[in-house]
Structure formats: structure tokens, C-alpha cells
Image: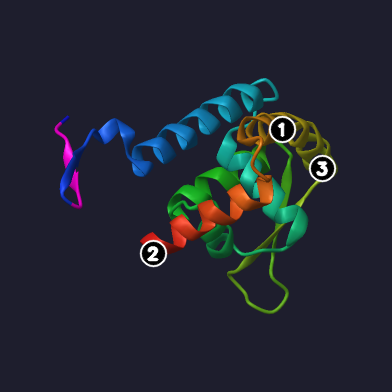
């Protein structure tokens, strides 16, 4: 990889904020995938279960936006979760073809187990961010994301 210029000086690309963010994101995803695999769940599936807990009945489109996947990918995730008995989908009472999606009892139990796995990863992140305040780190990361939007 070649160095890039920041201002008037050359910077090693491995020393950039962007690369560090990508490394952190990839490490988090690897950690979550590994832990969640033990309970036969993927990271995107966990995200869907979490969103459905806080927003029961959310549409496929809303779930796709929140999970950063395409509607087609979300459809595949929902089919898998439904076959596993973790969610139930029913036709919306007023909107015809639209389906509402909710957690089943098994979905809630799986989400509870998954939440422990995710909490362990979050604890590692918080410990690694010390001595900085985790809320400050979170706010800074959100500002970085907003700056690129």
C-alpha cells in the first residue's frame, strides 16, 4: 500500500483513522460471529432479534435499514429466523402484503443468550478504551461517522 498525503506530509495508510476503524470493526465482527456461532446465530440475525425486541412488528424494510443490509438479504435472514422458530411473521391487519414480525418465546430466549455474548465483547471494548470515558469514545465515533455521511 502506498502512503497518502495528509496536509503537507505523507502518512502510512496503516496509521490512518480509517484503517484503525476498519480494524476495530473487523475485530468486533469476528468476536461476535465466533461467540454467536455457539448458539447458532449470526451477527446480522442477532441485530434483527434486538431490533424486534425494541420495535415489535417492524417491517422488513425498516429492519434492513437498521441492520445495514439490502431488503433481499433481510428477507433471507427473516426466512432463516422463522424456520428456526425465533420469529413469527403474520400479515399486517391493514396493509395486505406487508408482514409484521415478532419474536417468539424461543426467539426471546436466544436473544437473552446472545445478549450475554455481545455484552462480553462490549465490556472488552470499554476496558480497552480506558482511561477514556466510554460515552466520550462513543460520541467521538458517532461524530466520525457523521462527518463521512
Q: CA distance from mark 3 to mark 1?
A: 22 Å
Which class describes the residues within 10 Å of circle 1: few (<14), some (14-19), or many (20+)? few
State the residue position of label 2: 149
Q: Quadrant of residue 92?
A: bottom right
Query: The C terminus appears in which quarter of the rendering?
Result: bottom left
Question: Is residue 109 depicted above or below 145 in this figure?
Answer: above
Location of residue 12 in the rendering, given as x and y in whole percent from the top left corner: 23, 33
Residue 19 lies within the magenta run: no
Residue name at image x 77 percent, y 53 percent = 53
Where residue 113 appears, as percent x and y from the top left, is 79, 31
Measured Cα–Cα span from mark 2 to mark 1: 28 Å
Q: Earlier in the sequence, mark 2 or mark 1?
A: 1
Magenta region: 2-7
The label nearer to you, 2 versus 3, is 2
Residue beneath label 1, please? 123
Q: Which residue is mark 3?
A: 108
Element class at badge 1 = helix
Amino acid at each position: 500500500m502506498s502512503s497518502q498525503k495528509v496536509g503537507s506530509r505523507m502518512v502510512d495508510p496503516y496509521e490512518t483513522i480509517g484503517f484503525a476503524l476498519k480494524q476495530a470493526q473487523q475485530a468486533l465482527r469476528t468476536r461476535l460471529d465466533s461467540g454467536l456461532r455457539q448458539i447458532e446465530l449470526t451477527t446480522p440475525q442477532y441485530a434483527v432479534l434486538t431490533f424486534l425486541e425494541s420495535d415489535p412488528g417492524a417491517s422488513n424494510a425498516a429492519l434492513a435499514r437498521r441492520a445495514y443490509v439490502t431488503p433481499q438479504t433481510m428477507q433471507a435472514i427473516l426466512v432463516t429466523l422463522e424456520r428456526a422458530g425465533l420469529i413469527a411473521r403474520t400479515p399486517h391487519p391493514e396493509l395486505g402484503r406487508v408482514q409484521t414480525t415478532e419474536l417468539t418465546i424461543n426467539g426471546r430466549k436466544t436473544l437473552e443468550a446472545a445478549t450475554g455474548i455481545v455484552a462480553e465483547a462490549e465490556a472488552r471494548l470499554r476496558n480497552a478504551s480506558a482511561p477514556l470515558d466510554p460515552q466520550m469514545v462513543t460520541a467521538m465515533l458517532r461524530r466520525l461517522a457523521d462527518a463521512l455521511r
